[in-house]
Amino acid sequence: MTLTFKQMLIADAKEIFLNLNEFGEAITYTPIATGTAKVLVGVIKDEPEIPIDWDDGTGTKATLEVHISNDATSGVVSPARLDSLLIRGATYYVRNKSGPDVDGTWNLDVVKVDVDEKGSIRRVNR
């Protein structure tokens, strides 16, 4: 059977980009809805820290762009705001998402911040 272009993009994303031996990195993803952590592979793009004003003073927020599979087994089907990701030993939270893209991945904009027990963002981790 011949694959369509879209099927080839999805296969390449899983086999090449979301591969620990290529571009992928292990991350621990925890949905805010269930609290059940899951280790998966994502492609992480470092973004510059952005200055921001918070109630407790001016600081910066560390941001990353993370690509994960739109797949119930090897990724996440429905990422949500404030889902947490443990990346390189630091905890980040989903701020925005786009996708799933044509290659079958979600593009997540994540930030490194403190969140209180109600899920409200409190302050920037420094």
Image (cartoon, grey):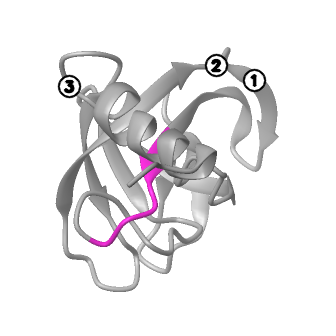
Please state the horizontal and vertical placement of residue 118, each as a whole percent of the image.
49, 80
Label 1, on which residue? 50
Q: Is residue 24 left or right of residue 124?
A: left
Using the image as rendered, state which of residue 94 and residue 62 is in the foreground: 94
Using the image as rendered, state which of residue 44 and residue 60 is in the foreground: 44
Crowd rating for badge 3 (residues with CA inside 10 Å; few <14, some 14–19, many 20+): some
Please state the horizontal and vertical placement of residue 36, each as a whole percent of the image.
20, 75
Q: Amino acid at mark 2?
A: Glu
Label 2, on which residue? 47
66 lies above or below 46 = below
* SS for dot 2: loop
Using the image as rendered, state which of residue 107 and residue 55 is in the foreground: 107
Using the image as rendered, state which of residue 25 and residue 22 is in the foreground: 22
Q: Is residue 1 left or right of residue 7?
A: left
Label 3, on which residue? 20
**Residues under labels 3 and 1: Cα distance?**
29 Å
Boundaries of the magenta span: 67-72
Please state the horizontal and vertical placement of residue 102, each as a whole percent of the image.
66, 52
Crowd rating for badge 1 (residues with CA inside 10 Å; few <14, some 14–19, many 20+): few
Find residue 31 and name its label.
none
Q: Is residue 69 magenta?
A: yes
* SS for dot 3: loop
Residue 124 visible in rendering: no
Q: Are marks 2 and 3 in contact (CB under 8 Å)?
A: no
Q: Earlier in the sequence, mark 3 or mark 1?
A: 3
Q: Are marks 2 and 1 in contact (CB under 8 Å)?
A: yes
Quarter of the image for the N terminus: give it: bottom left
Q: Amino acid at mark 1?
A: Ile
What residue is rendered at 44% in x and 37% in y?
13
What residue is rendered at 80% in x and 33% in y?
52
